[in-house]
Each structure stands twice: as structure tokens, then as C-alpha cells.
Amino acid sequence: ETRSSNPDYLCCTFRGSLVALRLKDGSQVWKSYMVGEPKESEKSATGRSKMGPSGASIWAAPTLDLKRKLIYVTTGDNFSNPATLTSDALVAIEMATGRIAWSKQVTEGDVSPSEKGPDFDFGAAPVMVKGPGGKDIVVAGQKSGIVYAFDPDKKGELLWQVRVGVGGSNGGVQWGLASDGRNIYAATSDKATIRTTGPAGEVIRTFDKTKGGGLTALHIADGSKAWFTPAQPCTAAGCSPAQSMALTAIPGVVFSGAYDGHLRGYSAEDGKVLWDF
């Protein structure tokens, strides 16, 4: 992905995919690509072929829906034109065949960095939870800083969406949500850097100790906020309050790690920090 903005690089032929392997011997059952086969679409400024579509990476573990015999994955941005409908999306794949049953895109036209898209990948795995009346809901958090709830019985129709962070290429929800069946918990990265100039004119980047992080609890039914706990103060050299790590929830406690080197346990009831290691 990082090479895609280089005009001398043959961009881009990578395609996100999900593979099913037989447990007994590892042989491939099917392979499902998130975009079509790349073809030459245009020329770069240096005359090299530009290929597309590409990208729509699957960053995180798939989620199984045994009731509907579907597998849910979330995808990242496209690396090159043309933009596809399966980037920055929740994608439902048939468990038996690998065929894409449906997909629901939340950010259109995100081609990054070659076309300077917003870079709003889904890096976190989708989470299946029970809503009011036992209704199944699929929830996913995006680098945009928004958490989305989808209806798996209506091909991913959007039920609600809530902003929990600023968002950006290093922002929003990065690696994983958690749920205890009552709330959805979302930590945000929103990592920021400060640029200064060194004695030889070199650019020096350091983390901004004042920006990033925070943990939000959302009610499953409608996405309304149960509570929010801001990031803890960051004082060590080179640290950031950003909370990028995938969350883990157990009854009564939510665990969240931060870029300051701390792992914290938060009360699921009100968000208070119970311990800090």
C-alpha cells in the first residue's frame, strides 16, 4: 500500500482475500477475492502501467455466523483506481462456496495513498451481538472514528452509527472492539505527531502527548453512549495516549492497552480505571 504513491512502482496488483482450508490436510476449498482481477487502467507520470482494482485488504480475523452460514469480514481501502464497492466495507461470504453474498460499504471512493483518499480502513474484526428481542446485530469500528451497527437479515442495512473519535490514517478504532452482551466497547487511537526541524534541517517526528485515546461504552440497542473515559495523562518520553490495541472484555471489566506502555482495566459499569499496570 505504501508503494502505491511512487510513480516508478507498478501499482497495484494486490487483492484482499479470504481462504478456506480443509482441516484434515490444509488443501484449499475456496479463495474469495475482495476485488476483481487487476488490469491496466492508466499510465503513471513516468509512463508505467497503473493497475487496478486493488486493495480491500482483510486486516482482522473473520467472524462466523453459523445460523446464516455466512462469514463476515471487514475490509480496508483500495490501493489504486478504480475504487470498488467492497473497500471500507462489511462483507458477507457464503461459508460453503466463498461467494460474496452481500457487502455494505461505509466510505466510498477511498483510494489511498495513491489518490489521497481518507485511508479509513476497517482494521477491527466485526462483532456479533444480540440486540433488543434477541435480534442479531453485527458491529464494526472504523479508522474514521465511527462505530457502525448492521442488520445481517437485511444485507447489512445500517441500524445506527456513532462517532467515538476524531479518526484518520492512524486514528479511530484500530484493532478491535469488545462486548459483554450489554454494551459495545470502543477504544480510539487518534495518534498524533509533532513535526520539528533538527539542527541539520532534518524533520523530526515525535508523538503528541496531549492527543489521542479514550474508551467509549455504547448501548447495543441504539448506539447511545453509556459512558466515556478520556485517555490517561501521558508523561514518559516518546509516549502517546493513543489506545490502538484490540479490547478484551470479561464480566465487569474491559481491558485496554495504550501507547504509553500501560495496560488498564476499566469498570464496565462506569468506565473508572480499576487498575493500571
Image (cartoon, rainbow, N blue to C red):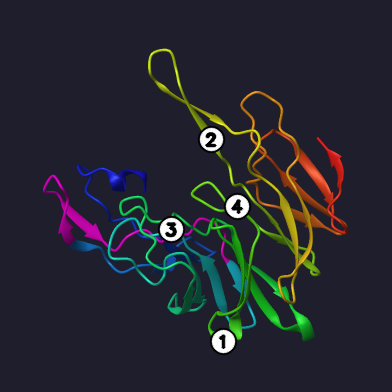
User: Residue 60's spot in the image, x, y percent?
Assistant: 55, 57
Callout 3 crowding tier (Cα within 10 Å): few <14, some 14–19, many ≥20 = many
Residue tagged by mark 1? Answer: 154
Residue tagged by mark 2? Answer: 193
- Give the vertical position of 90 relative to 4 (above or below): below
User: Which residue appears at 74% of the width and 79% of the height?
Assistant: 131
Residue most extreme to the top: 199
Q: Give the Cα distance between marks 1 and 4.
A: 26 Å
- Looking at the rendered structure, the kind of residue marked 2 is Thr
Tell me where the magenta segment starts and ends, as one range. Answer: 41-62
User: Which residue appears at 52% of the width and 59% of the height?
Assistant: 122
Q: Name the side, left or right, on which 261 lies relative to 197.
A: right
Q: Is the magenta stretch mostly helix, strand or loop?
A: loop
User: Which residue appears at 35% of the width and 67% of the height?
Assistant: 35
Question: From the viewer's perspective, is the residue at label 3 or at label 1 nearer?
Answer: 1
153 or 274: nearer the viewer: 274
- Residue 55's mark? none
Residue tagged by mark 3? Answer: 57
Tell me which numbered mark, 3 or 1, is placed earlier along the sequence.
3
Q: Name the side, left or right, on which 25 lies relative to 40.
A: right
Total numbered labels: 4
Callout 1 crowding tier (Cα within 10 Å): few <14, some 14–19, many ≥20 = few
For the residue labelled by badge 4, is the local secondary structure a helix, a strand or a loop?
loop
Question: From the viewer's perspective, is the residue at label 4 or at label 2 nearer?
Answer: 2
- Looking at the rendered structure, the kind of residue marked 3 is Ser
Tell me which numbered mark, 1 or 2, is placed earlier along the sequence.
1
